[in-house]
């Protein structure tokens, strides 16, 4: 195996590992949308981890690519229609609830205290 092919192999493996890591994290977060109670989530997360661990031994690059593509397709198929969004995050119920005042309005923070001058 030449240096160029070894570098290409390692680069492809690194990209695959990153895609698998991202897919696992997205699927785990998606599991929280479906299982609202922690005791349900722990069971579902364990099943998800077992599904990822079942293919841990696969070494063929093309097989790994097809497994990742199948996993991403299945993740997109089972996405929650109304995912949980943290209230203060963009799209949440409290996002920009208290926007800053418009320009030209002065805010006094002394709360009625007089200047000791």
Image (cartoon, rainbow, N blue to C red):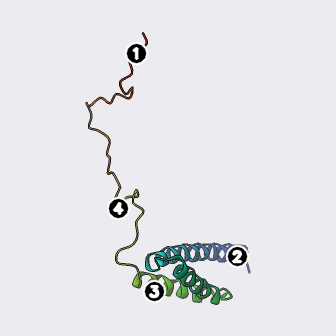
Mark toward the start of the polypeptide (4 vs 3): 3
Q: How many other residues sit within 10 Å of disc 3, few (<14), some (14-19) or many (≥20)?
A: few
Q: Position of residue 79 (x, y in %)?
A: 40, 80
Q: In this rendering, which labeled residue sits more in front, label 4 or label 1?
A: 1
Secondary structure under tag 2 reads: helix
Q: Is residue 54 left or right of residue 71?
A: right
Q: Is residue 23 above or below residue 91?
A: below
Question: Disc 4, disc 3: CB below 8 Å?
Answer: no
Mark toward the start of the polypeptide (2 vs 1): 2
Mark toward the start of the polypeptide (4 vs 2): 2
Q: Is residue 55 left or right of residue 75?
A: right
Q: In this rendering, which labeled residue sits more in front, label 4 or label 3?
A: 4
The quadrant where residue 113 appears? top left
Q: In this rendering, which labeled residue sits more in front, label 2 or label 3?
A: 3
Tell me how far mark 3 sits from mark 1, CA to CA: 66 Å
Picture disc at residue 91: 4
Secondary structure under tag 3 reads: helix
Mark toward the start of the polypeptide (3 vs 1): 3
Q: In this rendering, which labeled residue sits more in front, label 3 or label 1?
A: 1
Residue for badge 3: 74
Picture disc at residue 6: 2
Mark toward the start of the polypeptide (4 vs 1): 4
Residue drawn at (57%, 84%) of the image:
43
Q: How many other residues sit within 10 Å of disc 1, few (<14), some (14-19) or many (≥20)?
A: few
Q: How many other residues sit within 10 Å of disc 2, few (<14), some (14-19) or many (≥20)?
A: few
Tell me how far mark 4 sits from mark 3, CA to CA: 25 Å
């Amino acid at each position: 195996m030449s240096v160029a092919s070894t570098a290409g192999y390692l680069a492809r493996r690194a990209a695959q590992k990153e895609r698998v890591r991202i897919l696992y994290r997205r699927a785990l977060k998606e599991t929280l949308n479906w299982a609202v109670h922690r005791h349900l989530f722990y069971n579902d997360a364990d099943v998800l981890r077992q599904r990822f661990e079942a293919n841990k031994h696969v070494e063929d690059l093309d097989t790994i690519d097809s497994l990742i593509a199948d996993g991403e397709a299945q993740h997109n198929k089972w996405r929650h229609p109304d995912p949980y969004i943290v209230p203060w995050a963009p799209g949440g119920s409290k996002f920009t609830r208290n926007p800053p005042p418009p320009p030209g309005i002065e805010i006094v923070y002394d709360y009625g205290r007089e200047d000791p001058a």
